[in-house]
Image (cartoon, rainbow, N blue to C red):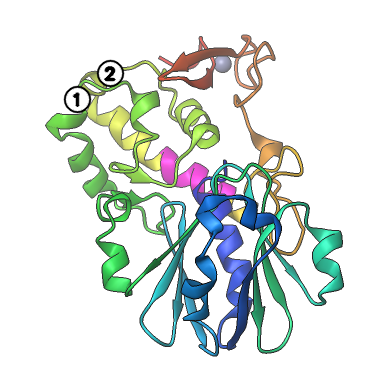
Amino acid sequence: MPEGPEVESIRLELLQLTARKVKEITLTPLSQKYPKYQGKEDEFSLFRGQELRNIHRFNKFLIWEFEKKPVILNHLGMSGCWTIVDTKEEISTKTTHPKVIIEMSKPPYAIFDDSRNFGQFRIFSSMEAVKLYPPIKKLGIDGLTKEFPLQDFVERIAEQRFQNRQIGDLLMDPRLVAGIGNIYKAEILFEAKIHPERIISTLTQEETILLGKSISKILLKAFHDKGSSFDARYKLPSGEGGQAQRWHMVYQRIDQPCGDCGSLIEKLIQKNRSTYFCPKCQH
Ligand SMILES: [Zn+2]
């Protein structure tokens, strides 16, 4: 699933669509096999002729803002991606499971392509309304903030509700820090030398500060490299892949030697999610 750095990289490329008017938002015949896309034409017709003003990101949500009030909330789900093409012919050659096509007043087209079909679109009456949507309203610190608010992080992680959680599980909870998924959770904990099963209440002040710095360092580094591409599933709207997988130290490296100490990387499962760690470097 794309994490914060991947979604932010996608957003940056999609911004080329702004300051243009929408000609039409259409649903493909394939999309109509799924109830969540049925009857959406009427909702999408609201945006016809409207200029796209901006695309925002909250955690892993993209919010499309237009000249008039309604906004579109879009989540990529497990495998959703956006592809930008200049001609209609390219839609069939450059996408495999196209669901939604946004046609601007002049090319390009932006196509939402989603093989596993967990992506979502919802219309909200305004920016104010979408900010009240619980998964957005409850978000903690955005991990991709350029000046990571370390003091705010130290205060938040000290909240009573987080004290009994294991760090590998808590890092995936966007009420603390938004933008972290399975890949970067493992890399952040390796960077901070903290074992994924450590209970929050046992972290020292020094470890907490190092953890905050590691979150910021890993997420911004991944964003700089446009995210991690392991297979064709994650790609940017231009068709390019990310490069962050090149420096992963632990993620999906089970039984391979740790780059720092040579011990073999191990894997464990927390709340049904796998995590990878070095048994010698992480305590
Ligand atoms: Zn090690």
* Disc with the residue nearer the chain's start (1 vs 2): 1
Residue at 29% from the left image edge and 41% from the top image edge? 176
x, y (%) of residue 151?
23, 47
Residue 107, image quadrant:
bottom right
Q: Is residue 226 visible?
A: no
Q: Decide: few, some or many residues near mark 1? Use Cα within 10 Å; few <14, some 14-19, many ≥20.
A: some
Q: Are marks 1 and 2 in contact (CB under 8 Å)?
A: yes
Against 272, is 72 above or below? below
Q: Amino acid at mark 1?
A: Gln
Q: How many marks do you count on the picture?
A: 2
Q: Which residue is mark 1?
A: 163
Residue 261, image quadrant:
top right
Q: Which residue is mark 2?
A: 199
Against 266, is 59 above or below? below
Residue at 61% from the left image edge and 70% from the top image edge? 14
x, y (%) of residue 281?
50, 16
